[in-house]
Image (tube, rainbow, N blue to C red):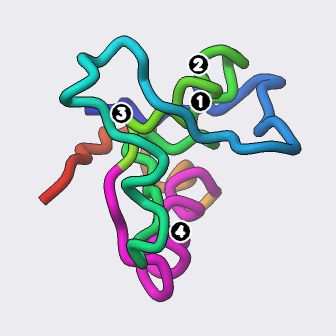
Amino acid sequence: CEPLCREPMSGDATRRGGGEPFAEDISAPPHLRSKLDDFKYSGFDRGHLVAASDIKYSQTAMDETFLLSNMSPQVGEGFNRGYWERLQRWGRGPGFSGAYSGGFVLSGAI
């Protein structure tokens, strides 16, 4: 459950350029850990459960959104890079903030 409010979305954290931003979460036991190869040639995007753009208050926190433990396989064309992306932009923009003072995002794999 992620609170959707302006504070975490405000700040100077940015997506780091160059190289592979995604990484294995070494805090997870090796036999339960997602690997970069799990997504290679799978046809699925690595969909953020907590979106990186929602966590701009701290560079460390934003970097941690790229750990594979924060990913769920998502159909890319039309969903992760389509409807879901538009919903996330709306949630960060004036469409949401003009109508609501806050909210929560519940996410997880189905």
State left or right for residue 32 relative to residue 25: left
Residue 61 numbered tag: 2
Who comes first in sequence, dot 4 or dot 1? 1
Who comes first in sequence, dot 3 or dot 4? 3
Q: How would you rate the neighbour count of disc 3 (Cα within 10 Å): few for under 14, some for 14-19, many for 20 or more?
A: many
State left or right for residue 8 relative to residue 57: left
Q: On the image, numbered disc 4 is attached to which residue?
A: 85
In what element is the residue under mark 2?
helix
Magenta part, dominant SS: helix
- Residue 106 is situated, as x and y percent measured from the top left of the image, at 24, 44
Residue 12 numbered tag: none
Q: How would you rate the neighbour count of disc 2 (Cα within 10 Å): few for under 14, some for 14-19, many for 20 or more?
A: some
Q: Nearer the viewer, mark 4 or mark 2?
A: 2
Who comes first in sequence, dot 3 or dot 1? 1
- Label total for image: 4
Q: Residue at x 50, y 55 (%)?
A: 91
Query: In the rendered image, which quarter contains the C terminus?
Result: bottom left
Foreground of the two, 40 or 49: 40
- Residue 90 is situated, as x and y percent measured from the top left of the image, at 54, 64
Determine whether 81 is above or below 27 in the image: below
In what element is the residue under mark 1?
loop
The amino acid type of the residue labelled 2 equals Ala
Q: On the image, numbered disc 1 is attached to which residue?
A: 55
The amino acid type of the residue labelled 4 equals Glu
